Image: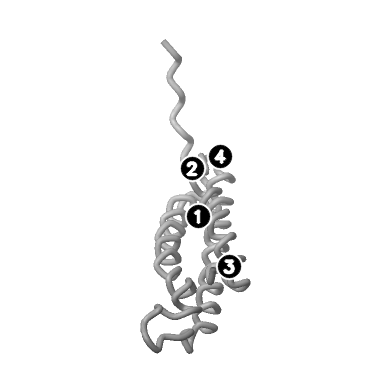
Amino acid sequence: MPSPQPPPVPPSSRRDRLLAAAADFLPVVFSIGFLFQCALLPLVGKAAFHGSHSPGASRAVWAAANIRCFSLSGVLLLAVGGLALHARLALGRRAGALPALLAIVAFLVLAAPFGLFAI
């Protein structure tokens, strides 16, 4: 039978408490932001660039603004995700799916301005 692990030491300094709160809160904000980013994805997709293939449909007039909004929200999401990952690793906690989600968001942010979703 393995020996029981000692309970984790509660954070003592104000910085440690703030880091522990960030390590709990920021991954949740990042995950919700990732869902929001996925909801914005159709705004920069094929229909935004080539129309819906309905009679008279063409490129959306606001497609450039959609790309700017999508990219800005992606950059903000990358910042929150980076802070969340840093807080988790600084406390020695598991990062979980944060690195994979950060890689996906980085791809989305880089692909949108280059029109890779307009294929």
Residue 92, which numbered label?
4
> Residue 68, how many percent across, how many down?
55, 79
Q: Which of the two discs, 3 and 1, sits closer to the camera?
A: 3
Q: Which residue: 40% across, 78% down?
A: 52
Disc 1 element: helix
Q: Quadrant of residue 105?
A: bottom right
Asked if disc 3 and disc 1 are in contact, CB closer than 8 Å, the reply is no
Q: Quadrant of residue 2?
A: top left
Badge 3: residue crowd in 10 Å (few <14, some 14–19, many ≥20): few
Three-letter code for the amino acid on which mark 1 is drawn: Leu
Vertical position of residue 38 compared to residue 24: above or below: below
Q: Which residue is mark 2?
A: 96
Badge 1: residue crowd in 10 Å (few <14, some 14–19, many ≥20): few
Which callout, 1 or 2, points at the residue further toward the start of the chain? 1
Disc 4 element: loop
Which callout, 4 or 3, points at the residue further toward the start of the chain? 4
Disc 2 element: loop
Mark 2 vs mark 4, CA separation in Å: 12 Å
Q: Which residue is mark 3?
A: 116
Mark 3 vs mark 2, CA separation in Å: 28 Å
Q: Which of the two discs, 4 and 3, sits closer to the camera?
A: 3
Which callout, 3 or 2, points at the residue further toward the start of the chain? 2
Q: Which residue is mark 1?
A: 18
Mark 4 vs mark 3, CA separation in Å: 37 Å
